[in-house]
Image (cartoon, grey):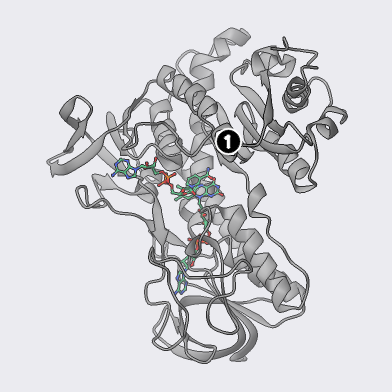
Amino acid sequence: MADSFDVVVIGGGPAGYPAAIRAAQNKLSVACIDEWKNLDGTLAFGGTCLNAGCIPSKALLESSELLHRAQHEFAAHGIKAAGVSVDVAQMQKRKAGIVKTMTQGILALFKAAGVTALQGHGKLLPGRKVEFTAADGTRRELTAKNVILASGSTPMELKSAPFDGKRIIDSWGALEIDAVPKKLGVIGGGVIGLELGSVWRRLGAEVVVLEALPDFLAVADQQLAKEALRHFKKQGLDVRLGAKVTGAKVSGDSVQVTYTDAKGEQSLTVDKLVVSIGRRPFTKDLLADGTGVQLDERGFIKVDDDCRTNAEGIWAVGDAVRGPMLAHKGKEEGVSVADRIAGKYAHVNYKTVPSVIYTAPEIAWVGLTEEQVKASGRAYKVGMFPFLASGRARAMEQAQGFAKLIAAQDDDEILGVHVIGPMAGELIAEAVLAMEYSASSEDLQRTIHAHPTLSEAIHEAALAADKRAIDSINK
Ligand code: FAD
Ligand code: NAI
Protein backbone atom coordinates (compact mmCIF):
# COMPACT_ATOMS: atom_id res chain seq x y z
CA MET A 1 0.00 0.00 0.00
CA ALA A 2 1.36 3.46 -0.92
CA ASP A 3 2.60 5.54 1.98
CA SER A 4 2.42 8.79 0.06
CA PHE A 5 -0.88 10.63 -0.52
CA ASP A 6 -2.10 13.94 -1.89
CA VAL A 7 -4.32 14.25 1.19
CA VAL A 8 -4.32 12.54 4.58
CA VAL A 9 -7.35 13.23 6.77
CA ILE A 10 -7.04 12.58 10.52
CA GLY A 11 -10.54 11.95 11.86
CA GLY A 12 -13.40 10.22 10.08
CA GLY A 13 -16.39 12.01 11.63
CA PRO A 14 -18.86 14.20 9.68
CA ALA A 15 -16.11 16.75 9.02
CA GLY A 16 -13.35 14.30 8.06
CA TYR A 17 -15.08 11.61 6.01
CA PRO A 18 -16.82 14.04 3.58
CA ALA A 19 -13.45 15.80 3.14
CA ALA A 20 -11.87 12.46 2.17
CA ILE A 21 -14.67 11.59 -0.25
CA ARG A 22 -14.60 15.01 -1.92
CA ALA A 23 -10.79 14.86 -2.20
CA ALA A 24 -11.14 11.49 -3.96
CA GLN A 25 -13.85 12.94 -6.22
CA ASN A 26 -11.32 15.64 -7.09
CA LYS A 27 -8.99 12.86 -8.31
CA LEU A 28 -6.58 13.23 -5.38
CA SER A 29 -5.08 10.20 -3.65
CA VAL A 30 -6.42 10.20 -0.09
CA ALA A 31 -6.26 8.27 3.17
CA CYS A 32 -8.60 8.81 6.12
CA ILE A 33 -7.45 7.74 9.58
CA ASP A 34 -9.83 7.17 12.47
CA GLU A 35 -9.39 5.56 15.87
CA TRP A 36 -13.00 5.53 17.13
CA LYS A 37 -13.60 2.48 19.32
CA ASN A 38 -17.11 1.43 20.25
CA LEU A 39 -18.05 0.03 23.65
CA ASP A 40 -17.80 -3.53 22.27
CA GLY A 41 -14.26 -2.80 21.07
CA THR A 42 -15.11 -2.59 17.37
CA LEU A 43 -13.56 0.22 15.34
CA ALA A 44 -15.84 2.45 13.30
CA PHE A 45 -15.76 5.52 11.09
CA GLY A 46 -18.40 8.24 11.58
CA GLY A 47 -17.04 9.93 14.71
CA THR A 48 -19.20 11.26 17.51
CA CYS A 49 -22.08 12.06 15.17
CA LEU A 50 -22.77 8.59 13.84
CA ASN A 51 -21.57 6.53 16.81
CA ALA A 52 -22.55 8.54 19.88
CA GLY A 53 -24.28 11.74 18.82
CA CYS A 54 -26.65 12.86 16.08
CA ILE A 55 -27.77 9.45 14.84
CA PRO A 56 -28.26 7.40 18.03
CA SER A 57 -29.89 10.37 19.76
CA LYS A 58 -32.35 10.84 16.90
CA ALA A 59 -33.13 7.09 16.92
CA LEU A 60 -34.05 7.24 20.62
CA LEU A 61 -35.92 10.54 20.19
CA GLU A 62 -38.03 8.96 17.44
CA SER A 63 -38.80 5.82 19.48
CA SER A 64 -39.65 7.72 22.65
CA GLU A 65 -41.79 10.19 20.70
CA LEU A 66 -43.79 7.31 19.23
CA LEU A 67 -44.45 6.06 22.75
CA HIS A 68 -45.51 9.54 23.85
CA ARG A 69 -47.94 9.79 20.92
CA ALA A 70 -49.37 6.36 21.59
CA GLN A 71 -49.93 7.28 25.23
CA HIS A 72 -51.08 10.87 24.82
CA GLU A 73 -52.27 11.54 21.25
CA PHE A 74 -53.74 8.34 19.89
CA ALA A 75 -56.94 8.77 21.91
CA ALA A 76 -57.65 12.11 20.23
CA HIS A 77 -57.40 10.34 16.86
CA GLY A 78 -59.93 7.76 18.07
CA ILE A 79 -57.32 5.02 18.41
CA LYS A 80 -57.46 2.90 21.53
CA ALA A 81 -53.99 1.76 22.47
CA ALA A 82 -54.29 0.42 25.97
CA GLY A 83 -51.33 -1.36 27.55
CA VAL A 84 -48.64 0.28 25.44
CA SER A 85 -45.31 -0.32 27.15
CA VAL A 86 -41.60 0.10 26.60
CA ASP A 87 -39.00 -2.51 25.76
CA VAL A 88 -35.79 -0.54 26.32
CA ALA A 89 -33.60 -3.43 25.14
CA GLN A 90 -35.38 -3.54 21.76
CA MET A 91 -35.24 0.27 21.50
CA GLN A 92 -31.50 0.17 22.10
CA LYS A 93 -31.08 -2.75 19.68
CA ARG A 94 -32.85 -0.79 16.93
CA LYS A 95 -30.63 2.22 17.65
CA ALA A 96 -27.48 0.08 17.55
CA GLY A 97 -28.58 -1.44 14.23
CA ILE A 98 -29.03 2.00 12.68
CA VAL A 99 -25.62 3.12 13.92
CA LYS A 100 -23.94 -0.03 12.58
CA THR A 101 -25.56 0.31 9.14
CA MET A 102 -24.67 4.00 8.88
CA THR A 103 -21.05 3.60 10.04
CA GLN A 104 -20.44 0.60 7.78
CA GLY A 105 -21.94 2.68 4.99
CA ILE A 106 -18.95 5.03 5.27
CA LEU A 107 -16.57 2.15 4.50
CA ALA A 108 -18.68 1.35 1.43
CA LEU A 109 -18.57 5.02 0.36
CA PHE A 110 -14.79 5.08 0.86
CA LYS A 111 -14.39 1.94 -1.24
CA ALA A 112 -16.54 3.31 -4.04
CA ALA A 113 -14.71 6.66 -4.04
CA GLY A 114 -11.22 5.13 -3.73
CA VAL A 115 -10.40 6.47 -0.26
CA THR A 116 -7.86 4.40 1.72
CA ALA A 117 -9.44 3.73 5.13
CA LEU A 118 -6.95 3.38 7.97
CA GLN A 119 -8.27 2.43 11.40
CA GLY A 120 -5.98 3.50 14.23
CA HIS A 121 -4.26 6.59 15.58
CA GLY A 122 -2.94 9.44 13.47
CA LYS A 123 -0.35 11.97 14.63
CA LEU A 124 0.88 14.91 12.64
CA LEU A 125 4.68 15.09 12.44
CA PRO A 126 6.70 18.04 11.19
CA GLY A 127 7.09 18.28 7.43
CA ARG A 128 3.59 17.14 6.44
CA LYS A 129 4.19 13.61 7.64
CA VAL A 130 1.68 11.56 9.58
CA GLU A 131 2.49 8.71 11.90
CA PHE A 132 -0.21 6.04 11.69
CA THR A 133 -0.45 3.48 14.48
CA ALA A 134 -2.82 0.63 13.67
CA ALA A 135 -4.95 -1.05 16.31
CA ASP A 136 -2.40 -3.90 16.54
CA GLY A 137 0.39 -1.41 17.33
CA THR A 138 2.13 -1.50 13.95
CA ARG A 139 3.38 1.90 12.78
CA ARG A 140 3.72 3.51 9.37
CA GLU A 141 4.90 6.92 8.37
CA LEU A 142 2.76 8.53 5.69
CA THR A 143 3.75 11.56 3.65
CA ALA A 144 1.11 13.95 2.40
CA LYS A 145 0.97 17.07 0.27
CA ASN A 146 -1.91 18.22 2.47
CA VAL A 147 -3.19 17.09 5.87
CA ILE A 148 -6.71 17.81 7.11
CA LEU A 149 -7.14 17.67 10.89
CA ALA A 150 -10.70 16.68 11.81
CA SER A 151 -10.24 15.31 15.31
CA GLY A 152 -13.57 16.55 16.68
CA SER A 153 -14.56 17.21 20.28
CA THR A 154 -15.21 15.52 23.58
CA PRO A 155 -17.61 16.23 26.50
CA MET A 156 -16.53 18.80 29.06
CA GLU A 157 -16.26 17.53 32.60
CA LEU A 158 -17.52 19.41 35.62
CA LYS A 159 -14.96 19.48 38.43
CA SER A 160 -17.69 19.36 41.06
CA ALA A 161 -19.36 16.35 39.36
CA PRO A 162 -16.66 14.20 37.75
CA PHE A 163 -17.75 11.35 35.45
CA ASP A 164 -17.63 7.88 36.98
CA GLY A 165 -19.13 6.27 33.88
CA LYS A 166 -21.88 4.52 35.85
CA ARG A 167 -23.90 7.05 37.82
CA ILE A 168 -22.38 10.31 36.62
CA ILE A 169 -22.31 10.01 32.88
CA ASP A 170 -21.72 11.98 29.68
CA SER A 171 -24.01 12.11 26.63
CA TRP A 172 -22.68 8.81 25.28
CA GLY A 173 -23.53 7.19 28.61
CA ALA A 174 -26.99 8.76 28.49
CA LEU A 175 -27.56 7.14 25.08
CA GLU A 176 -26.65 3.71 26.46
CA ILE A 177 -28.84 3.59 29.60
CA ASP A 178 -30.41 0.12 29.61
CA ALA A 179 -33.38 0.64 31.96
CA VAL A 180 -35.54 3.71 32.55
CA PRO A 181 -34.15 5.46 35.65
CA LYS A 182 -36.71 6.53 38.22
CA LYS A 183 -35.10 9.94 38.57
CA LEU A 184 -32.57 11.41 36.15
CA GLY A 185 -30.61 14.57 36.81
CA VAL A 186 -29.16 16.58 33.94
CA ILE A 187 -26.59 19.33 34.43
CA GLY A 188 -26.84 21.77 31.52
CA GLY A 189 -30.09 22.78 29.83
CA GLY A 190 -28.54 23.05 26.37
CA VAL A 191 -29.12 20.97 23.27
CA ILE A 192 -28.00 17.63 24.71
CA GLY A 193 -29.75 18.17 28.05
CA LEU A 194 -33.04 18.93 26.31
CA GLU A 195 -32.85 16.17 23.70
CA LEU A 196 -31.69 13.37 26.00
CA GLY A 197 -33.72 14.71 28.92
CA SER A 198 -36.78 14.47 26.64
CA VAL A 199 -35.97 10.87 25.66
CA TRP A 200 -35.87 9.59 29.24
CA ARG A 201 -38.77 11.80 30.36
CA ARG A 202 -40.99 10.35 27.62
CA LEU A 203 -39.93 6.86 28.63
CA GLY A 204 -41.14 7.56 32.15
CA ALA A 205 -38.24 8.98 34.16
CA GLU A 206 -38.63 12.02 36.39
CA VAL A 207 -36.14 14.45 34.85
CA VAL A 208 -34.62 17.46 36.59
CA VAL A 209 -32.50 19.80 34.45
CA LEU A 210 -30.12 22.13 36.29
CA GLU A 211 -29.13 25.09 34.11
CA ALA A 212 -26.59 27.61 35.38
CA LEU A 213 -27.83 30.58 33.38
CA PRO A 214 -30.90 32.55 34.47
CA ASP A 215 -32.26 32.54 30.90
CA PHE A 216 -33.52 29.40 29.22
CA LEU A 217 -31.87 28.57 25.87
CA ALA A 218 -29.92 31.81 25.92
CA VAL A 219 -28.55 31.21 22.40
CA ALA A 220 -32.03 31.11 20.85
CA ASP A 221 -34.53 33.84 20.02
CA GLN A 222 -36.07 34.52 23.43
CA GLN A 223 -39.68 34.47 22.19
CA LEU A 224 -39.00 30.98 20.88
CA ALA A 225 -37.14 29.99 24.07
CA LYS A 226 -40.11 31.07 26.21
CA GLU A 227 -42.52 29.04 24.10
CA ALA A 228 -40.17 26.03 24.30
CA LEU A 229 -39.88 26.23 28.09
CA ARG A 230 -43.66 26.33 28.42
CA HIS A 231 -44.00 23.11 26.43
CA PHE A 232 -41.15 21.32 28.20
CA LYS A 233 -42.61 22.19 31.60
CA LYS A 234 -45.99 20.85 30.46
CA GLN A 235 -44.27 17.62 29.45
CA GLY A 236 -42.92 17.33 32.98
CA LEU A 237 -39.31 18.33 32.40
CA ASP A 238 -38.37 20.02 35.67
CA VAL A 239 -36.09 22.80 34.39
CA ARG A 240 -34.38 24.77 37.18
CA LEU A 241 -32.69 27.95 35.99
CA GLY A 242 -29.83 29.82 37.67
CA ALA A 243 -28.71 26.56 39.32
CA LYS A 244 -24.99 26.40 40.08
CA VAL A 245 -23.86 22.88 40.94
CA THR A 246 -21.49 22.76 43.88
CA GLY A 247 -21.05 19.02 44.22
CA ALA A 248 -22.22 15.53 43.25
CA LYS A 249 -21.50 12.45 45.35
CA VAL A 250 -22.25 8.87 44.38
CA SER A 251 -23.51 6.87 47.29
CA GLY A 252 -24.78 3.36 46.65
CA ASP A 253 -27.35 3.42 43.86
CA SER A 254 -27.86 7.16 43.79
CA VAL A 255 -26.15 10.50 43.31
CA GLN A 256 -26.58 13.39 45.74
CA VAL A 257 -26.29 16.69 43.93
CA THR A 258 -25.89 20.00 45.71
CA TYR A 259 -26.42 23.35 44.00
CA THR A 260 -27.20 26.95 44.75
CA ASP A 261 -29.89 29.06 43.13
CA ALA A 262 -31.69 32.32 43.88
CA LYS A 263 -33.28 30.69 46.96
CA GLY A 264 -29.95 29.49 48.39
CA GLU A 265 -28.48 26.03 48.86
CA GLN A 266 -30.42 23.13 47.37
CA SER A 267 -29.97 19.39 47.08
CA LEU A 268 -31.28 16.71 44.81
CA THR A 269 -31.02 12.92 44.80
CA VAL A 270 -31.11 11.12 41.45
CA ASP A 271 -30.44 7.61 40.13
CA LYS A 272 -28.22 8.87 37.35
CA LEU A 273 -26.71 12.23 36.54
CA VAL A 274 -25.96 13.33 32.99
CA VAL A 275 -23.42 16.13 32.66
CA SER A 276 -23.96 18.02 29.39
CA ILE A 277 -22.36 21.42 29.85
CA GLY A 278 -20.78 21.68 26.42
CA ARG A 279 -17.96 20.03 24.52
CA ARG A 280 -14.32 20.94 24.05
CA PRO A 281 -12.00 20.40 21.07
CA PHE A 282 -10.18 17.06 21.06
CA THR A 283 -6.51 17.28 20.08
CA LYS A 284 -4.93 14.77 22.45
CA ASP A 285 -1.76 13.23 20.99
CA LEU A 286 -2.62 14.73 17.59
CA LEU A 287 0.33 17.09 17.10
CA ALA A 288 3.99 16.18 17.51
CA ASP A 289 6.40 18.94 18.51
CA GLY A 290 7.48 21.20 15.68
CA THR A 291 4.45 20.94 13.37
CA GLY A 292 3.82 24.68 13.60
CA VAL A 293 0.08 24.16 14.14
CA GLN A 294 -1.20 26.49 16.85
CA LEU A 295 -4.09 26.14 19.26
CA ASP A 296 -6.08 29.10 20.59
CA GLU A 297 -6.58 29.88 24.28
CA ARG A 298 -9.59 27.52 24.45
CA GLY A 299 -7.74 24.63 22.80
CA PHE A 300 -9.29 24.94 19.33
CA ILE A 301 -6.95 24.49 16.36
CA LYS A 302 -6.34 28.02 15.04
CA VAL A 303 -7.58 28.47 11.47
CA ASP A 304 -8.37 31.34 9.10
CA ASP A 305 -11.74 31.79 7.35
CA ASP A 306 -10.74 29.11 4.83
CA CYS A 307 -9.72 26.55 7.51
CA ARG A 308 -5.97 26.96 6.95
CA THR A 309 -3.82 26.46 10.07
CA ASN A 310 -0.57 28.33 10.70
CA ALA A 311 1.37 25.52 9.02
CA GLU A 312 1.64 25.32 5.23
CA GLY A 313 -0.52 22.52 3.77
CA ILE A 314 -2.18 21.71 7.09
CA TRP A 315 -5.92 22.41 7.37
CA ALA A 316 -8.41 21.87 10.19
CA VAL A 317 -12.20 21.49 10.15
CA GLY A 318 -15.25 20.59 12.27
CA ASP A 319 -15.61 20.66 16.05
CA ALA A 320 -11.84 21.01 16.51
CA VAL A 321 -12.00 24.57 15.13
CA ARG A 322 -14.01 27.72 15.98
CA GLY A 323 -17.70 28.00 15.15
CA PRO A 324 -20.78 26.00 16.10
CA MET A 325 -20.19 22.34 16.95
CA LEU A 326 -22.56 20.94 14.36
CA ALA A 327 -22.16 18.05 11.95
CA HIS A 328 -23.38 20.01 8.92
CA LYS A 329 -20.99 22.89 9.64
CA GLY A 330 -18.10 20.40 9.81
CA LYS A 331 -19.22 18.70 6.61
CA GLU A 332 -19.27 21.96 4.68
CA GLU A 333 -15.82 22.87 5.99
CA GLY A 334 -14.40 19.46 5.10
CA VAL A 335 -15.79 19.52 1.58
CA SER A 336 -14.70 23.13 1.03
CA VAL A 337 -11.12 22.34 2.08
CA ALA A 338 -10.99 19.32 -0.25
CA ASP A 339 -12.12 21.62 -3.07
CA ARG A 340 -9.59 24.33 -2.17
CA ILE A 341 -6.78 21.76 -2.15
CA ALA A 342 -7.84 20.78 -5.68
CA GLY A 343 -7.66 24.44 -6.72
CA LYS A 344 -11.43 24.88 -6.93
CA TYR A 345 -13.55 27.73 -5.57
CA ALA A 346 -15.16 27.03 -2.21
CA HIS A 347 -16.99 29.08 0.38
CA VAL A 348 -18.73 28.32 3.68
CA ASN A 349 -21.42 30.81 4.58
CA TYR A 350 -21.31 30.81 8.39
CA LYS A 351 -24.28 33.20 8.47
CA THR A 352 -26.63 30.50 7.22
CA VAL A 353 -25.68 27.54 9.41
CA PRO A 354 -29.04 26.26 10.71
CA SER A 355 -29.54 25.08 14.30
CA VAL A 356 -32.05 22.36 15.13
CA ILE A 357 -33.08 20.94 18.49
CA TYR A 358 -34.92 17.67 17.95
CA THR A 359 -37.33 17.92 20.86
CA ALA A 360 -41.12 17.96 20.56
CA PRO A 361 -42.06 20.53 19.53
CA GLU A 362 -38.96 20.72 17.37
CA ILE A 363 -36.93 23.94 17.39
CA ALA A 364 -34.99 25.34 14.44
CA TRP A 365 -33.53 28.63 13.37
CA VAL A 366 -31.20 30.34 10.96
CA GLY A 367 -29.74 33.83 11.00
CA LEU A 368 -30.15 36.43 13.70
CA THR A 369 -32.44 36.35 16.73
CA GLU A 370 -34.71 39.30 17.36
CA GLU A 371 -32.44 40.30 20.26
CA GLN A 372 -29.42 40.36 17.92
CA VAL A 373 -31.26 42.37 15.27
CA LYS A 374 -32.43 44.85 17.90
CA ALA A 375 -28.87 45.21 19.20
CA SER A 376 -27.59 45.84 15.66
CA GLY A 377 -29.79 48.94 15.50
CA ARG A 378 -31.22 48.03 12.09
CA ALA A 379 -34.94 48.73 11.72
CA TYR A 380 -36.84 45.49 11.27
CA LYS A 381 -40.28 43.93 10.94
CA VAL A 382 -41.51 40.60 12.28
CA GLY A 383 -44.04 38.17 10.85
CA MET A 384 -45.49 35.37 12.99
CA PHE A 385 -47.65 32.41 12.12
CA PRO A 386 -49.03 30.09 14.82
CA PHE A 387 -49.33 26.39 13.95
CA LEU A 388 -52.79 26.56 15.59
CA ALA A 389 -53.89 28.09 12.28
CA SER A 390 -52.25 25.39 10.14
CA GLY A 391 -54.66 22.82 8.73
CA ARG A 392 -51.87 20.28 8.34
CA ALA A 393 -50.59 20.74 11.90
CA ARG A 394 -54.15 20.35 13.18
CA ALA A 395 -54.61 17.18 11.11
CA MET A 396 -51.39 15.88 12.65
CA GLU A 397 -52.66 16.76 16.15
CA GLN A 398 -49.51 18.86 16.52
CA ALA A 399 -50.78 22.42 16.30
CA GLN A 400 -48.17 23.84 18.67
CA GLY A 401 -45.65 26.63 18.32
CA PHE A 402 -45.08 29.17 15.59
CA ALA A 403 -42.93 30.31 12.69
CA LYS A 404 -41.32 33.73 13.02
CA LEU A 405 -39.60 35.66 10.28
CA ILE A 406 -37.54 38.79 10.82
CA ALA A 407 -36.82 41.03 7.83
CA ALA A 408 -35.08 44.38 7.42
CA GLN A 409 -37.39 47.38 7.23
CA ASP A 410 -35.32 49.12 4.54
CA ASP A 411 -34.67 46.48 1.86
CA ASP A 412 -36.82 43.57 3.12
CA GLU A 413 -33.76 41.24 3.47
CA ILE A 414 -34.56 38.17 5.55
CA LEU A 415 -32.43 38.44 8.69
CA GLY A 416 -33.59 35.43 10.67
CA VAL A 417 -36.21 32.70 10.73
CA HIS A 418 -37.19 30.86 13.91
CA VAL A 419 -39.55 27.92 14.06
CA ILE A 420 -40.89 25.95 16.98
CA GLY A 421 -43.37 23.31 15.94
CA PRO A 422 -43.82 20.09 13.99
CA MET A 423 -40.91 19.24 11.64
CA ALA A 424 -39.25 22.59 12.32
CA GLY A 425 -35.90 21.06 11.38
CA GLU A 426 -37.19 20.22 7.91
CA LEU A 427 -39.02 23.55 7.48
CA ILE A 428 -35.92 25.61 8.23
CA ALA A 429 -34.23 24.34 5.03
CA GLU A 430 -36.44 26.67 2.99
CA ALA A 431 -35.33 29.65 5.06
CA VAL A 432 -31.67 28.62 4.76
CA LEU A 433 -32.00 28.43 0.98
CA ALA A 434 -33.81 31.77 0.87
CA MET A 435 -31.10 33.45 2.94
CA GLU A 436 -28.32 31.77 0.95
CA TYR A 437 -29.78 33.43 -2.16
CA SER A 438 -30.26 36.75 -0.30
CA ALA A 439 -34.03 36.49 -0.72
CA SER A 440 -36.38 39.15 0.60
CA SER A 441 -39.50 38.33 2.59
CA GLU A 442 -41.41 39.32 -0.56
CA ASP A 443 -39.61 36.56 -2.49
CA LEU A 444 -40.97 34.05 0.03
CA GLN A 445 -44.40 35.69 -0.09
CA ARG A 446 -44.51 35.22 -3.88
CA THR A 447 -43.42 31.56 -3.73
CA ILE A 448 -46.23 29.01 -4.01
CA HIS A 449 -46.41 26.61 -1.07
CA ALA A 450 -48.47 23.43 -1.38
CA HIS A 451 -51.63 23.22 0.67
CA PRO A 452 -52.06 21.78 3.20
CA THR A 453 -48.44 21.55 4.27
CA LEU A 454 -46.48 22.71 7.27
CA SER A 455 -44.35 24.80 4.90
CA GLU A 456 -47.27 27.22 4.59
CA ALA A 457 -46.25 28.44 8.06
CA ILE A 458 -43.06 29.95 6.61
CA HIS A 459 -45.06 31.46 3.73
CA GLU A 460 -47.62 32.98 6.08
CA ALA A 461 -44.92 34.29 8.46
CA ALA A 462 -43.33 36.08 5.47
CA LEU A 463 -46.74 37.52 4.51
CA ALA A 464 -47.37 38.55 8.11
CA ALA A 465 -44.16 40.60 8.11
CA ASP A 466 -46.02 42.96 5.74
CA LYS A 467 -49.39 42.48 7.47
CA ARG A 468 -50.65 40.50 4.48
CA ALA A 469 -51.20 37.13 6.16
CA ILE A 470 -54.29 35.33 4.91
CA ASP A 471 -54.67 32.49 7.39
CA SER A 472 -53.95 34.33 10.62
CA ILE A 473 -54.94 37.68 12.08
CA ASN A 474 -52.48 40.46 11.17
CA LYS A 475 -51.32 42.36 14.25
P1 FAD B 1 -16.22 13.99 15.52
O1 FAD B 1 -17.55 13.54 15.06
O2 FAD B 1 -15.98 14.06 16.97
O3 FAD B 1 -15.18 13.01 14.84
C1 FAD B 1 -13.83 13.09 15.08
C2 FAD B 1 -13.23 11.73 14.81
O4 FAD B 1 -11.82 11.85 14.82
C3 FAD B 1 -13.58 10.67 15.85
O5 FAD B 1 -14.01 9.51 15.23
C4 FAD B 1 -12.26 10.44 16.58
O6 FAD B 1 -12.13 9.09 17.02
C5 FAD B 1 -11.26 10.74 15.49
N1 FAD B 1 -9.95 11.14 15.97
C6 FAD B 1 -9.63 12.16 16.78
N2 FAD B 1 -8.31 12.26 16.95
C7 FAD B 1 -7.77 11.26 16.21
C8 FAD B 1 -6.44 10.83 15.98
N3 FAD B 1 -5.40 11.48 16.51
N4 FAD B 1 -6.25 9.75 15.19
C9 FAD B 1 -7.29 9.10 14.63
N5 FAD B 1 -8.58 9.47 14.82
C10 FAD B 1 -8.79 10.54 15.60
N6 FAD B 1 -24.75 17.84 15.49
C11 FAD B 1 -25.69 18.08 14.56
O7 FAD B 1 -25.41 18.81 13.61
N7 FAD B 1 -26.95 17.55 14.66
C12 FAD B 1 -27.30 16.75 15.70
O8 FAD B 1 -28.43 16.27 15.75
C13 FAD B 1 -26.34 16.47 16.70
N8 FAD B 1 -26.64 15.69 17.73
C14 FAD B 1 -25.68 15.41 18.67
C15 FAD B 1 -26.02 14.61 19.77
C16 FAD B 1 -25.09 14.32 20.72
C17 FAD B 1 -25.47 13.44 21.90
C18 FAD B 1 -23.76 14.82 20.59
C19 FAD B 1 -22.71 14.49 21.61
C20 FAD B 1 -23.42 15.62 19.53
C21 FAD B 1 -24.38 15.93 18.56
N9 FAD B 1 -24.08 16.76 17.48
C22 FAD B 1 -25.05 17.03 16.54
C23 FAD B 1 -22.75 17.35 17.30
C24 FAD B 1 -21.97 16.52 16.27
O9 FAD B 1 -21.88 15.19 16.72
C25 FAD B 1 -20.59 17.12 16.06
O10 FAD B 1 -20.70 18.47 15.70
C26 FAD B 1 -19.86 16.38 14.96
O11 FAD B 1 -19.74 15.02 15.25
C27 FAD B 1 -18.46 16.98 14.75
O12 FAD B 1 -17.85 16.33 13.70
P2 FAD B 1 -16.26 16.19 13.61
O13 FAD B 1 -16.01 15.32 12.44
O14 FAD B 1 -15.65 17.51 13.70
O15 FAD B 1 -15.84 15.42 14.95
P1 NAI C 1 -24.65 23.38 24.98
O1 NAI C 1 -23.62 24.42 24.84
O2 NAI C 1 -25.72 23.26 23.99
O3 NAI C 1 -25.38 23.52 26.38
C1 NAI C 1 -24.68 23.52 27.59
C2 NAI C 1 -25.56 24.16 28.62
O4 NAI C 1 -24.98 23.91 29.89
C3 NAI C 1 -25.68 25.67 28.46
O5 NAI C 1 -27.02 26.04 28.55
C4 NAI C 1 -24.85 26.21 29.62
O6 NAI C 1 -25.33 27.44 30.09
C5 NAI C 1 -25.03 25.11 30.64
N1 NAI C 1 -23.95 25.02 31.63
C6 NAI C 1 -22.63 25.23 31.45
N2 NAI C 1 -21.97 25.01 32.60
C7 NAI C 1 -22.89 24.66 33.52
C8 NAI C 1 -22.84 24.30 34.90
N3 NAI C 1 -21.68 24.26 35.55
N4 NAI C 1 -23.99 24.00 35.53
C9 NAI C 1 -25.17 24.03 34.87
N5 NAI C 1 -25.29 24.36 33.57
C10 NAI C 1 -24.16 24.66 32.90
O7 NAI C 1 -23.81 22.01 25.13
P2 NAI C 1 -24.30 20.50 25.12
O8 NAI C 1 -25.75 20.40 25.35
O9 NAI C 1 -23.36 19.78 26.02
O10 NAI C 1 -23.98 20.07 23.64
C11 NAI C 1 -22.66 20.20 23.11
C12 NAI C 1 -22.71 20.56 21.66
O11 NAI C 1 -23.14 19.46 20.89
C13 NAI C 1 -23.69 21.68 21.37
O12 NAI C 1 -23.04 22.91 21.46
C14 NAI C 1 -24.14 21.41 19.99
O13 NAI C 1 -23.33 22.13 19.11
C15 NAI C 1 -23.88 19.91 19.78
N6 NAI C 1 -25.16 19.20 19.73
C16 NAI C 1 -26.02 19.50 18.71
C17 NAI C 1 -27.24 18.90 18.63
C18 NAI C 1 -28.16 19.28 17.53
O14 NAI C 1 -27.71 19.92 16.59
N7 NAI C 1 -29.45 18.94 17.60
C19 NAI C 1 -27.67 17.90 19.60
C20 NAI C 1 -26.72 17.69 20.66
C21 NAI C 1 -25.51 18.32 20.69
The answer to whether residue 93 is above or below residue 34 is above
23 and 409: which one is in front?
409
Q: Quadrant of the N terminus?
A: bottom right
Q: Which residue is mark 1?
A: 369
Q: Residue at x 38, y 36 (%)?
A: 189
Q: Residue at x 32, y 30 (%)?
A: 241
Q: Position of residue 98 (x, y in %)?
A: 56, 49
Res. 360 in view = no
Q: Residue at x 48, y 64 (%)?
A: 320
Q: Residues within 10 Å of mark 1 (few under 14, many from 20)?
A: many
Residue plotted at (39% across, 66% down): 299
Q: In the image shown, does 215 or 186 lie closer to the viewer?
A: 215
- Horizontally, is 364 left or right of 427 in the view? left
Along the line of sight, which residue is nearer the eye, 428 or 112?
428
As drawn, which residue projects farthest toward the left?
Answer: 251
Q: Tell me where residue 38 appears, x and y as whole percent.
A: 42, 61
Compared with 141, 189 (above or below) is above
Q: Position of residue 362 (x, y in %)?
A: 57, 31
Determine if residue 191 is in view: yes
Observer-nearest of 336 and 372: 372
The kind of residue on which mark 1 rests is Thr
- Rendering quarter of residue 174: top left
- For mark 1, give the secondary structure: loop
Q: Quadrant of the C terminus?
A: top right
Q: Is residue 80 left or right of residue 265?
A: right
In the image, 81: left or right of 350?
Answer: left
Asked if the residue at label 1 sits under 8 Å from ligand 2, the reply is no
Q: Is residue 263 above or below residue 106?
A: above
Q: Position of residue 231 (x, y in %)?
A: 48, 20
